Image (cartoon, rainbow, N blue to C red):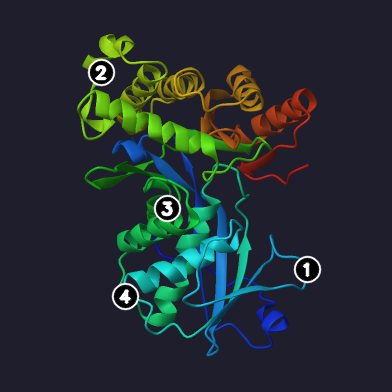
Amino acid sequence: MSTHQPRPPSGFAQIFGEPATTWASAPGRVNLIGEHTDYNDGLVLPTAIPQRTTVELCPAKDGRVTVYSDELSEPGTTLSYLLGEESPTGDWLDYVRGVTWVLRQSGLGARLSGLRLRIQSQVPVGSGLSSSAALLVSLLRALRIALALPLSDVELARLARKAEVELVGAPVGLMDQLACSLCGPGAALFLDTRSLAMRTVPLPAALELVVIHSGVVHSHVAGDYRTRRRECEQAAERLSVRSLRELDESVLPNLDALPAPLGRRVRHVVTENARVEAAVASLAAGDGVRLGELFRQSHASMRDDYEVSVPAVDLLVSLGDADPDILGARLTGGGFGGSVVMLAKAGCGLVAARRIASAYEAQSGHCPTVLVPGLPGC
């Protein structure tokens, strides 16, 4: 996918007193199916969403990185840090610190002498749609241009993940960064996170995606996500495999021998990998009914076996499943809040999204945001 997009209107010079010299953007992503499989060397099927994060920058000579975020900064207030002093503090600026840190660690930061950055994002934070990866990838894209860095899109994604894992402290897999770096509109990316084999899978014209943010935010840095990853590592060790990807469905009858909840975690990962392969076949065949059933099975597995859903998200999924124009719905992203992806009949997604969001708000008290097909929030 081309990274060149129409340049957004900019107030960069009003903030920093000089114009931006470079800009780049990256999309958020929605994972159609294949959840909590990427850090288990498994299969995933993400696609890009229309919402993007844009970074504008100009170089500085003072050794300082000064940042303004339209969404997260206090009005008129910038944050800054010195290059070489990228210690995490637990705030959103850690993602920027992570990028300059990883470039220095990889030997690519020699030309960094300071930066002025403006960040604008349409991807809601904590929505399960990779707001953090979109920021990391867009910033690395801008720096790739500004510093003439010899980075492929895959190498750029690897650096983005290293920044998020090692400096920010979020133990994420590689799917989000690869999706934000490689995905384009109208197709999903079928990715094997063990081999990095990948291919695009067109989305059938007879089907339409709906993505609704539940209004319940989550964080990959929080403990529950870390706990699930640790449980998978413990299960792999007990089963004498390097990762859960090495297992197939023949192991399912024997999982009761594992201490709870490890057997349930393994069952989710093994069956979810199988569902990704079935989903790819369903897309190729244009079989929306089968794909919708896979969505429902995936959500049930995430709710019951992996235990990463919450009541508000379960309500949103059930409202989607009950809608006559929706073929299936599921939690997307890491869980504990975030967004739901639904499969709609083509041409029906917008009307269905309005119905579902309205009913959800009335029953849950949460304020939903329809991101695809695209509606303003409450």
Earlier in the chain: of badge 3 and badge 4, it is 4
Q: Secondary structure at mark 4?
A: loop
Name the residue type under label 4: Gly
- The residue that mark 4 highlights is 107
- The CA span between labels 3 and 2 is 30 Å
- The residue that mark 2 highlights is 249
Q: Tell me the mark number nearer the camera, choosing from 2 and 4.
A: 4
Q: Position of residue 136 (x, y in %)?
A: 48, 61
- The CA span between labels 2 and 4 is 43 Å
Earlier in the chain: of badge 3 and badge 1, it is 1
- The residue that mark 1 highlights is 75
Q: Position of residue 140 (x, y in %)?
A: 44, 68
- The CA span between labels 3 and 4 is 18 Å
Q: Residue at x 71, y 31 (%)?
A: 357
Q: Secondary structure at mark 2?
A: helix
- The residue that mark 3 highlights is 165
Name the residue type under label 3: Val
- The CA span between labels 3 and 1 is 30 Å
Q: Quadrant of the C terminus?
A: top right
- The CA span between labels 2 and 1 is 53 Å
Name the residue type under label 2: Glu
Q: Tell me the mark number nearer the camera, choosing from 3 and 2.
A: 3
Q: Position of residue 219 (x, y in %)?
A: 57, 43
Q: Position of residue 356 (x, y in %)?
A: 68, 28
